[in-house]
Image (cartoon, grey):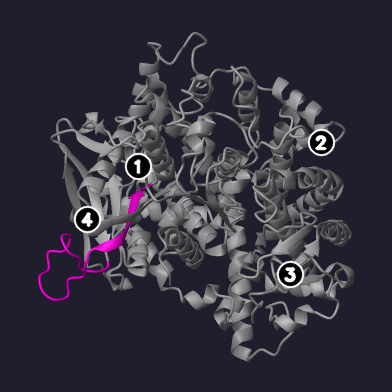
Amino acid sequence: MAILEDQKVSVNRESVFKLMKELCNKTIKEFDVQNQSPYNGRLVDVCQELFESSSLILSSLLQIVEIAPKFDYDESTPGNGFRSIVSIYDTAILHVISVLRTCLEHSKNLIFRMSYFTKELENYMAVFRFLILSTQQLVGSIDYNSGNCLFPSIDVEDYTSYISVFKTVKGFDASCFYSRPLGLQFCPSVAKMFKIICTFFASYNLACEKNNGTFDMIVNSAKYMISPEERALKIIEIIREADIEFCKGFWNLPEYATIPKWLGIVMAVCEMRSIETHCNLTLETKECKKVDIPIPSTTKESHTIKYRIISSLHRLNISKKNGSKINPLSPHLILHCHGGGYLATSSKSHECYLRSWAKQSSCPIVSIDYSLAPKNPYPNAIEEVLYAYAYIINNPHEFGWTGEKIVFVGDSAGGNLVTSVTMRLINLNVKRMPDALVPIYTPFIFQYLPSPSRLLSFMDPLLHVGMLLRCLTAYTMGDIPINKVPLLSKLDENLGTEGNNVGDYIEEFKNSQLMDYFNSLNHSKTFKSFLDSTLNSSFSVDSAVFSNNMSISENDIEEDVLNQTQNVEIGSNPNYIMLSSENFDTSLIQYFEENLLLRNDYDALMNDDDEVFEEISEVKVKQFELKTPIQEKKRSLSSSIVRTASLAACYAIDNFNDWFDSAKKPIGHEDKEKLRNSLSMTPQEAALDKQNDIIQEKTAIDELLRIKIPRNPEISPMYAKKEHLVKFPPTYFIGCHLDPLLDDTISFAKKLKECGGKVKEVKLLNNLCHGFLNFTYVSPECRKGSDECLKIIKEALGIKD
């Protein structure tokens, strides 16, 4: 079973909405009868709401679809936050169709999971409510018709008017994105990983709050696995209580896992070393003079900058091995800075992909372990990396390098850091610049400014908006008191960031178990074993399951056909939904083929570069040899018994779910009235109406939003002037379509190009999350994304395959 790699399947978006309305209508007629089940009425209600809201959903979507193309980097690189929102809409609508048709097909079964279908549809209706309300805020508050910038103007004196967008959106119910639709926008392996992580956090946190042990955590894990709604409520509660220590602990999780030795990625050299900082260094300027590189202020006591050197080959000066197998110095070197929001992680947790890069590129990698915020805010990290760069340039042989070509690579905050160091080198007029710059999913503007992709932070398990605010403040302002206060704690009216009452809130938070539970992780054998077992079990899954040429086993088929999700990709034609050829719901594609509407709306694309969506009536989905669990096929007696037992088990789990659920009302029900009120309003009217409804309570998040972040090009490269940007080395941008920081990448790449800078490539990856490089051991798709990054790095270095 496979969808050929050089072909893409797409469906007309408006026809898909017509199909959804038809299925909703059929479901209402099927279940609009007296029934003892409490879910019968709820199922009819949610289908009625989907039916009535479909026009609003489609019109809201088409409004974004219409303006999205003008914000692309260029015509050959479709991608921006608007397109990302559209892809989430598309993924949700495809899943709703899949649930509705399966519900109708199974409605006469003896074992019918009515509560499952009801809650699944209620969750996805909540997704639509949030998407509509939040995009109304964005489009209604910012004029996107007059220009092609994804951010509001950064040149205005006061950003206060833009903050209302974030304040209003945080009032909408985003808990649905941590319930059943958790990770819906990502590829299956990433979504599965997020569900495991979020389930663990919810249960671990509850155990800590009640001073209970491992057994209680196991019981709670079962609860949150069975009841996604309960998990969502707990995750939202944890996020609301999160302070700066929580953010650091959360992002430091990869530090606690160990790399399985049997993976086979063995390095000749992989160890921590240090650069002595006893004196100032010098670099040559373009005028053939010398410029001083001072000792970083953070190293005046330790006198060292730590770094990890990784090489797959024994080379001169970096290997302790002697003999004839020592390789000569490499003409290429990768200088890497890790991500982690300037708050967390180290080169250790980034070995998972750095080892692979070192092996496939055959060149040494130097990864700098710079000092972290909030103890070491801007510009400490820049000073350390700048000093390390000067030392490497002056002493290339110590790093197994000839001194020929060096490329700066950084992911997330690390990408911002290498860009900032490049900016500092330009300001110093240094002659020896890096040969290329490769920032990966990087923030380029550290301000509380809304953009389409930044709305995704409300639904992203790794980059929630509250955590982003913490990082931004910690790196730019240091260890300020307000960063230690839970996000939604109510503050006194006269309380400022320096107020005396802040200490009371901090003390109250310290007395709770929540702040300390991450601090104990490093000493927890249970936690370490959990991460290690997750890592091993996830990686041990045969990668063929995720490849195009998959072969699904009987167990896979019988597992749960209702949990399949059809991913979508960003296509050139915004009027069509392009289905992913790697992560697809085979039964859904088969269903589309069987419907008459696809006779006119089905297209096969032979190549991404061809005339998109060219109608080829001869091509049929049947050519892809789709095999679906919904298909009628002969089953052995044993497999039929297994399937029946599986359905019975799922039915029992649904009953347990009802028992666990404390919130009997549908998830996201509080936004139902808000959406109904928006039906007759323009986006501008709806935005103003919701902003007027904001409860005027001062919370920690409001104080964070009030802080004025410095408009410094070394913090936010988007503020850089043309005369500096034109001197940038060749730059290769890598981003993810579903990353909250996507618009940073698009906007800075466009600005760099407009200023005469050398933008060599803007590569955007489908269905991957921010930070995907850290998940290469547990996700085949992330591993493939890492290989794409390496391909670009090798191109930047001039390494030929």
Q: Earlier in the sequence, mark 2 or mark 3?
A: 3
The label nearer to you, 1 versus 2, is 1
Q: Quadrant of residue 322?
A: bottom left
For residue 676, the mark is 2
Residue type for callout 4 = Phe
For residue 344, the mark is 1
In the image, which residues are magenta? 312-338
Q: Residues within 10 Å of mark 2 (few under 14, many from 20)?
A: some
Q: Earlier in the sequence, mark 1 or mark 2?
A: 1
The label nearer to you, 2 versus 4, is 4
- Which SS class for mark 3? strand
Q: Earlier in the sequence, mark 3 or mark 1?
A: 3
251 is higher (above) or lower (below) than 773: above
- Spatial distance from mark 2 to mark 4, Cα to Cα? 63 Å
Q: Earlier in the sequence, mark 4 or mark 1?
A: 1
- Spatial distance from mark 1 to mark 2, Cα to Cα? 43 Å
Residue type for callout 2 = Arg
The percent coordinates of residue 1 (x first, y second) are 64, 82
For residue 399, the mark is 4
- Which SS class for mark 2? helix
Residue situated in front as seen by the camera: 373 or 233: 373
The quarter of the picture where the C terminus appears is bottom left
